[in-house]
Image (cartoon, helix red, strand yellow):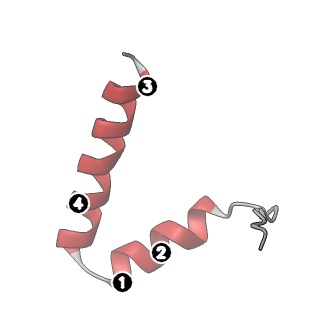
Amino acid sequence: MYETQQAEFRYTDRQRFMRHLLRNGPRAVAEFEKAQQLWAERAGT
């Protein structure tokens, strides 16, 4: 038995992502902003 790992390359479309996030409402936007803050804090450690 063996295991493989695969990763695909994707172009990021930040504008499209934000449009969809906004469509999901203010809570989705707030939660994503909070996640970004956590990621930035963890990257600094």
**Residue 40: x percent and y percent?**
38, 30
Mark 3 vs 1: CB contact within 8 A: no
Give neighbour class at mark 2: few <14, some 14-19, many 20+ (Cα, 10 Å): few
Q: Which mark is residue 23?
A: 1
Mark 1 vs 2: CB contact within 8 A: yes
Q: Quadrant of the N terminus?
A: bottom right
Q: CA distance from mark 4 to mark 1?
A: 14 Å
The amino acid type, in three-letter code, at marker 2 is: Arg
Q: CA distance from mark 4 to mark 2?
A: 15 Å
Q: Earlier in the sequence, mark 4 or mark 3?
A: 4
Residue 14 appears left or right of 3: left
Helix, strand or loop for disc 4: helix
**Residue 45: x percent and y percent?**
36, 16
Task: Kindly identify which residue carries mark 2.
Answer: 19
x 77%, y 62%: residue: 7
The amino acid type, in three-letter code, at marker 4 is: Glu
The vertical placement of 27 against 12, above or below, is below
Residue 27 appears left or right of 22: left
Which of the pair 4/28 is nearer the observer? Answer: 4
**Residue 27: x percent and y percent?**
17, 70
Helix, strand or loop for disc 3: helix
Which of the pair 39/29 is nearer the observer? Answer: 39
Task: Kindly identify which residue carries mark 3.
Answer: 43
Mark 3 vs 2: CB contact within 8 A: no
Give neighbour class at mark 1: few <14, some 14-19, many 20+ (Cα, 10 Å): few
x 23%, y 60%: residue: 31
Q: Quadrant of residue 16?
A: bottom right
Q: CA distance from mark 3 to mark 2?
A: 26 Å
Q: Which mark is residue 31?
A: 4
Q: Nearer the viewer, mark 4 or mark 2?
A: 4
Q: Quadrant of residue 28?
A: bottom left
Q: Earlier in the sequence, mark 4 or mark 1?
A: 1
